[in-house]
Image (tube, grey):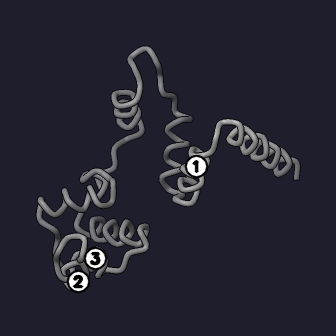
Amino acid sequence: MEQKLAENIKYFRKLKNWTQQDLANQLQISRSVVAKWESGSSVPDVKTLVLLSGIFEVSVDHLIGNHISRSDLLKEFQKIYLSKQQQLDEETIEIVDFVVKNPQIKQSLLELKKLPIRKQKVVHRLLKTLIDEIKKT
């Protein structure tokens, strides 16, 4: 667990394009403490883990390397986003997983969401056309 935590702290810090000092400033600690976490020579206390999970916008479980199964994730999504009558399928989970693993796509989708519906539809048609053309080659 400690090695996975070290890797995850470094990974999520880099996703934000932060230096160790930037993260240390967010937590009001010294840079050397962050360096020790990332090398695995020490681990944050529980209070700091909660702060880190908030800063990185991931659960503590995810931060420490306890990934939940797809079925558990599906249940959580349904609990949070949907009524009991609506179902969330495996394909939707795969899309969410793809977006999480590709921050550039996430950023593009956030920008798309800000556009008026009419422009969103134009982008959708362009994307569909591009994908169809790529499939042909």
Q: Is residue 134 left or right of residue 49?
A: right
Camera-nearest residue between 118 and 29? 118
Which numbered circle lies on residue 31?
2
Q: What kind of element bears circle 1?
A: helix
Give the CA distance from mark 1 to mark 2. 34 Å
Q: Which residue shows up at 53% across the image and 53% down it?
A: 106
**Which one is closest to the eye, mark 3 or mark 2?**
2
Q: Tell which circle, 3 or 2, labels the residue nearer the N-terminal end.
A: 2
Work out whether mark 1 precedes mark 2 in sequence or the reverse, and give the earlier one: 2
Camera-nearest residue between 45 and 81: 81
**Given the image, on which type of amino acid does mark 2 rest?**
Arg
Q: Secondary structure at mark 3?
A: helix
Using a 10 Å C-alpha cutoff, classify the residue at mark 3 as few (fewer than 14 neighbours), some (14 to 19) or many (20 or more): many
Q: Residue at x 48, y 27 (%)?
A: 88
Q: From the viewer's perspective, is the residue at label 1 or at label 3 nearer?
A: 1
Q: Pick out the residue farthest to the bottom.
A: 32
Q: Among all residues in the image, which is located at the extreme front? A: 116
- Is residue 1 at least partly visible in the picture? yes
Q: Which residue is mark 1?
A: 109
Q: What residue appears at the point 37 percent right and 66 percent down from the top-left corner?
A: 12
Question: Horizontal and vertical percent for residue 112?
Answer: 61, 47
**Mark 3 to mark 2 CA distance (whole Å):** 11 Å
Quadrant in the picture for the N terminus: bottom left
> Residue tagged by mark 3?
38
Amino acid type, mark 1:
Leu
Residue type of the residue flagged with mark 3: Glu
Near mark 1 (Cα within 10 A), the count class, few <14, some 14-19 or many ≥20, is few
Q: State how far apart marks 1 and 3 are (Cα).
A: 31 Å
Q: Residue at x 20, y 85 (%)?
A: 32
Q: Is residue 49 left or right of residue 19?
A: left
- Dot 2: within a 10 Å radius of its alpha carbon, few (fewer than 14), some, or many (20 or more) residues? some
Q: Nearer the viewer, mark 1 or mark 2?
A: 1
